[in-house]
Every structure is written in structure tokens, then in C-alpha cells.
């Protein structure tokens, strides 16, 4: 999923991967060059793909412990988190964030403005 600025410049994207259709689980990874990309319509579209179009029941997000801003975003969204030390190396841990379709159903970000 690509996010473009009003001038048409690519400013962010989300890639969906490691899809397990039988289990209803998919992983997502995102990157941006602007903090202004994560609007409510983008958030709704980002989660509509796994939960509505693909029928997933769980989204997984892996985040470096050093990526403080993404960890904060995941926590704000209401993801459940587990920290795993050394998952990215001897001195570098990672959070595994999970978000269920039930959590999305009641999320304040899943409501029309």
C-alpha cells in the first residue's frame, strides 16, 4: 500500500507479508519519510486489507526496540506487545506487536470521522 503526498510524492508505504490464510495471520511492515502519512483514512485502509479483504483475525508487527516512534504508534493503536531480547542481535531486542480483528473492531481509528 503506497501513500502519496498531495503533490504525488511517495511518502510512505506498508508491505503485507508472511500471510498464513488458514490461520488468518499476516505481518505488516511500514516505512515513511513524513510523519504526516498516518491519517485516519490511511489507517482504516491499512487495516481494511488484512481484516476485511483477506479475512485475517490477527496482524503482526515486528519493531526494533530502538524504534521508539513506531513502538509508541503501535501502543497508541492498542496492539498487544511482547519483548524478545536479542532477537535482532546480542545487544538489540525486538517487540512483537499483535492486533486482533476484535481489537480493530472497537478501535477509535476504525470509526468514521
Image (tube, helix red, strand yellow):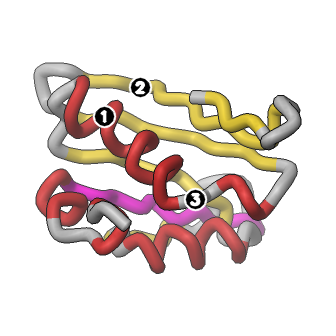
Q: Tell me if label 1 and label 2 are in contact, CB under 8 Å.
A: no
Q: Main secondary structure of the magenta part?
A: strand
* Residue under pointer 2: 18
Q: How far apart are the alpha carbons under marks 1 and 2?
A: 12 Å
Neighbor class of circle 2 (other Cα within 10 Å; few <14, some 14-19, many 20+) is: few
Q: In the image, is residue 47 part of the stretch drawn in magenta?
A: no
Mark 3–mark 2 distance (CA, rounded to whole Å): 25 Å
User: How many badges with numbers are in the image?
Assistant: 3
Quickly name the residue at label 1: 50
Where is residue 75? Give x, y as percent. Answer: 46, 77
Residue in the image at 58% along x and 78% along y = 72
For residue 52, side relative to residue 89 (left or right): left
Is there CB contact under 8 Å for labels 3 and 1? no
Mark 3 sits on what residue?
Answer: 39
Instruction: Residue 61 in the image: state x and y as whole percent.
Output: 47, 51
Earlier sequence position, callout 3 versus callout 2: 2
* Magenta region, residue range: 91-100
Q: Is residue 54 above or below residue 102?
A: above
Secondary structure beneath dot 1 equals: helix
Question: Is 80 situated above or below 18?
Answer: below
Q: Residue at x 47, y 51 (%)?
A: 41
Label 1, residues with CA under 10 Å away: few <14, some 14-19, many ≥20:
many
Amino acid at each position: 500500500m503506497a501513500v502519496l503526498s498531495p503533490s504525488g510524492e511517495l511518502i510512505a508505504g506498508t508491505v503485507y507479508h508472511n500471510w498464513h490464510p488458514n490461520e488468518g495471520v499476516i505481518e505488516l511492515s511500514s516505512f515513511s519519510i513524513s510523519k504526516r502519512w498516518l491519517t485516519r483514512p490511511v489507517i482504516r485502509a491499512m487495516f481494511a486489507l488484512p481484516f476485511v479483504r483477506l479475512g485475517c483475525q490477527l496482524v503482526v508487527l515486528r519493531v526494533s526496540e530502538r524504534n521508539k516512534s513506531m513502538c509508541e504508534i503501535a501502543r497508541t493503536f492498542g496492539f498487544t506487545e511482547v519483548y524478545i531480547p536479542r532477537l535482532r542481535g546480542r545487544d538489540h531486542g525486538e517487540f512483537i506487536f499483535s492486533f486482533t480483528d476484535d481489537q480493530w473492531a472497537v478501535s477509535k481509528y476504525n470509526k468514521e470521522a
